[in-house]
Amino acid sequence: MSELRLMAVHAHPDDESSKGAATMARYVDEGVRVMVVTLTGGERGDILNPAMDLPEVHGRMAEIRRDEMARAAEILGVEHHWLGFVDSGLPEGDPPPPLPEGCFALEPLEVPTHALVRVIRDFKPHVITTYDENGGYPHPDHIKCHQVSVAAYEAAADHRLFPEAGDPWTPLKLYYNHGFLRQRMQVLQDEFAKHGKEGPFATWLEKWDPDEDLLAKRVTTRIECAKYFAQRDEALLAHATQIDPNSFFFSTPMEWQQRLWPTEEFELARSRVPVTLPETHLFAGIEGYE
Ligand SMILES: [Zn+2]
């Protein structure tokens, strides 16, 4: 089998560990080269773990998040590349405040596209993953990540575009992450009830926007990766400023997750090879796989 390469494009450090991480770990285990590209440094992330809310952490966020990301990449066994843009932060308030000057979301589309095309032409991925047009959740950097990834998927193959960014390379498939599904949460919540316990997802399930249920209908590809869930959790916990180990994310027993929902979900957004849907592999249809 010739070498296969997968590139996962993400907005902030920690996104790679919460979206599709077990899938990446599985492919690494199968001998695929996997690279995570993180578009921003996550400089405007809040400290979301009370145990890390320390004076020595404040003011050093950029540096600390670089170290956390390096550790997560090591745990997942992936290569990693920073694209070097500045976190836009999540604007909160009504109306929301303007985006900070110089941030990623305000960059003209061609600037980050050019930078990502360079990395694509260098790494030569067969498959790229990113977010859908809603960003998975409405953070301006996630929506921009979608726009940049789609533009770069197209532009990398076109010799007329960004000629100084390397020889053209044609990625074959582009996917969106769709792991945050209501149905998964419901199944796990029901298992808590079956064991006479109150599950942690009640508020989420009540507040769920019915439109978001449509996400499940967009899933084309389910990757079996239960064996790698523990590795996923370990990578997530490496982002210690962002992840509270006592949060509800970690309250569902591993055995339930592995038995009741052993997959991660993706939507095939574009393909340059013939495909048959639904699929169980990101590389399905690509010569050299299986
Ligand atoms: Zn993010």
Image (cartoon, rainbow, N blue to C red):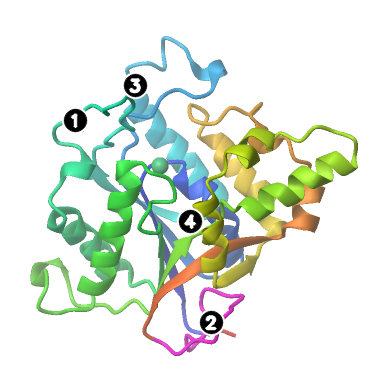
According to the picture, the residue beneath numbered tag 2 turns out to be 284
CA gap between label 4 and label 3 equals 25 Å
Task: Give left or right: position of 8 versus 118.
Answer: right
Q: Residues within 10 Å of mark 1 (few under 14, many from 20)?
A: some
Q: Give the residue at x 14% y 54%.
A: 111
Q: Residues within 10 Å of mark 3 (few under 14, many from 20)?
A: few
Q: Nearer the viewer, mark 3 or mark 2?
A: 2
Contact check, label 4 and label 3, Cβ < 8 Å: no
Amino acid on which the number 2 mark rests in the picture: Ala
Q: Residues within 10 Å of mark 2 (few under 14, many from 20)?
A: some
Task: Quadrant for residue 79, please give it.
Answer: bottom left
Q: Is residue 30 visible?
A: no
Whole-percent x and y of residue 147? 27, 58
CA gap between label 4 and label 2 equals 21 Å
According to the picture, the residue beneath numbered tag 4 turns out to be 78
Contact check, label 4 and label 2, Cβ < 8 Å: no
According to the picture, the residue beneath numbered tag 1 turns out to be 100
Amino acid on which the number 4 mark rests in the picture: Val
Contact check, label 1 and label 4, Cβ < 8 Å: no
Residue 60 is marked as: 3
Q: Eyeballing the image, is 18 above or below 167?
A: above
Q: Eyeballing the image, is 158 above or below 30?
A: below
**Mark 1 secondary-structure assignment:** loop
Residue reaching furthest to the top: 55
- Closer-to-camera residue (246/58): 246
Whole-percent x and y of residue 112? 19, 54
**Mark 4 secondary-structure assignment:** loop
Is tag 4's residue or tag 2's residue first in the polypeptide sequence?
4
Is tag 3's residue or tag 2's residue first in the polypeptide sequence?
3
